[in-house]
Image (spheres, rainbow, N blue to C red):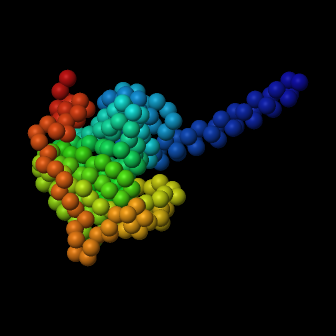
Amino acid sequence: MKIANLIFAGVAFISAIAVHPAVAQTQSANPPLGLVAKAVKAHVGNAELTDGSTVYTGDYVSTEDGGDLLLRIGTASLELLAHSAAHIYVAPYGAVVELNHGSAAYTTPGGRTNIVIVASDVRATPDITMADFGRVSLDDPCNVTVSSQRGQVNVQTGSESRLVEEGKAYRVRAENSIEYRKYLSPDENNYHDYHEHKPCAALEMVKGKPPIAAGQSRFLLVALVGSGALTTWGVYKALESPDRP
């Protein structure tokens, strides 16, 4: 019996040694992306998020109805509003966010960290030369609203792009909706190998909507953003210096 116990203990010890390097390797392959400044009814995967916890590249974060999630990413911030979800990834410039549904607000300081948001095939890139504050909302798989309250953001869908200036909001009709087989950073070279494109023109014709005519812009000015119109508690706090108490 003693010999059997010793053999079992030896096998367990060897197994533990074999497992720990694998865990360390997994953590190093998923570097930290940012810190949670505020979490209300917010989750990473199926786990609840709490203030002060760390979010890693590739994480799937979401909020429930009435929820809110504010992330500090270097000197920038990302706020996932109620009933929203996204995959987030580390990028050389800061972070790239794949918005799966709902709305995300961002603040970037200008000249340093940037946050790019991708929704369907619409890519919103804040102007890195100035401080920016705006919001991206995935209204449905083929329509995205991009608002800029401060600074300006370059928005691209297909071959068309537009600079959304301060105080404006545009409804952007995506060229394609996306169905994912596997989630991957939109900045990866093989990103498009892991999802399928479905032309929005065909999808909207099924719903009785007319297709975009040749030469017609995919960008529709829908509103002028008044001062304070986009501000939420999280973004307001994010506008303060991270060094302030």
226 or 28, nearer to the observer = 226
From this view, report whether residue 187 is shown above or below residue 13.
below
Image position, residue 119 (x, y; %): 35, 54
From this view, report whether residue 130 is shown above or below residue 72.
below
Please indicate whether residue 151 sits to the left or right of residue 49 in the image: left
Q: Residue at x 52, y 41 (%)?
A: 24
54 or 20, nearer to the observer = 54
Name of the residue lying farthest toward the bottom? 214
Q: Residue at x 31, y 34 (%)?
A: 70
From this view, report whether residue 13 is shown above or below residue 169.
above
Tell me where residue 49 sits by quadrant: top left
160 or 97, nearer to the observer = 160
Q: How many marks?
A: 0
Q: Quadrant of the C terminus?
A: top left
Please indicate whether residue 53 sits to the left or right of residue 242 in the image: right
Tell me where residue 60 sits by quadrant: top left
From this view, report whether residue 73 is shown above or below residue 190.
above
User: Is residue 76 visible to us here?
Assistant: yes
User: Is residue 189 visible to us here?
Assistant: no
Q: Residue at x 26, y 42 (%)?
A: 105
177 or 193, nearer to the observer = 177
Image position, residue 210 (x, y; %): 32, 67
Q: Quadrant of the N terminus?
A: top right
Image position, residue 131 (x, y; %): 14, 46
Please indicate whether residue 231 sits to the left or right of residue 1 in the image: left
Name of the residue lying farthest toward the right? 1
Q: Residue at x 16, y 39 (%)?
A: 229
Image position, residue 144 (x, y; %): 30, 54
